[in-house]
Amino acid sequence: MTRYRPRQGMVAWAFHRLSGVAIWVFVVVHVIDIYLVGGDPQAYDTILQVYASPAGRVGELLLGAALLYHALNGLRIVIMDFWPRTTVWQQQLWYACWLIFVVVGLPGAYIILKPIWGG
Amino acid sequence: MAFTSGAGRARPQGDRLETALWYLMRLSGLGLFVLALAHFSILHFLFDPANETAQFIIDKRWDELFWRALDWLLLMLVLFHSFLGVRTALKDYVSGGARTAVLSLLYGLAILLFVLGTIVVMTLPRAAVMG
């Protein structure tokens, strides 16, 4: 039932699945930690300190990167699925994803990581 | 004419439920493009996780019905989209009886998160009530 064109966008597809599963794992953890805001606020605050630690911030950066990639490439998929003629531009759309990823991602990475060195 | 895609899963043929899910996956994705990116930007760029304590959520984040409703909408979209996405991935790698077992666990986890998320967003007292 599930078939993919091997040459067209195979790397885009692999990254999409990898980032999607990674985001899903965080969503499972995140709904549980937010539940604790009501259920056990002390436990929530402790988890939050882990998120805000240097290692937590690297994780935050990876989550943000997965989310941004998945969002941009997801938009690319929607464009090509709803307007099939745009599929001839799939390579250009893929480069556009990475251009936006870098332009948005670099300042974002700076904001997320700067508290590590006391910014 | 087959409706194929250069990157996404080809639209299922002949199965109404799977076809509906294929469309809903894309529509929920568009919703999440706005809501999930906005959520991440607000809580990681405008605010910092170092300050987002339980008290912050009570006093600021969920002090208004609008933000609770928006976060609940985000929860619904993300549970639908992420669990259906993982379902698609699992169906690629697991088959037969194991597929039934794994998918049952997956749906059970989705229901649990739906319940936990809905409980906290609807029952967390407001700052004014707590004094």
Image (tube, coloured by chain):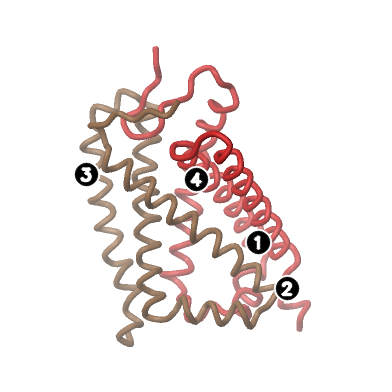
Q: Residues within 10 Å of mark 1 (few under 14, many from 20)?
A: some
Q: Tell me which chain the residue with mark 3 is part of.
A: A
Instruction: Tell me where residue B26 appears, x and y as whole percent.
Output: 48, 37
Q: Residues within 10 Å of mark 3 (few under 14, many from 20)?
A: few
Residue B10 picture quarter? top left
Q: Residue at x 64, y 77 (%)?
A: B59
Q: Dot 4, crowdedness within 10 Å: few (<14), some or many (≥20)?
A: some
* Residue type highlighted by circle 1: Arg
Verify CB contact (< 8 Å) between mark 2 and mark 1.
no
User: For mark 4, what is the residue?
Assistant: B86
Among all residues in the image, which is located at the extreme front? B97
Residue A95's disc number: 3
Q: Which chain is brown?
A: A
Measure how far apart labels 2 and 4 are at the Cα level.
35 Å
Please, what is the three-letter code of the amino acid marked with disc 2?
Arg
The alpha-carbon separation of the residues under discs 2 and 1 comes to: 11 Å
Q: Which residue is mark 1?
A: B68
In which quadrant will I find the N terminus of chain A? top left
Q: Amino acid at mark 3?
A: Tyr
**Secondary structure type for disc 3:** helix
Label 4 is found on which chain of the structure? B
Q: Quick one: label 2, few (<14), some, or many (20+) residues within 10 Å?
A: some
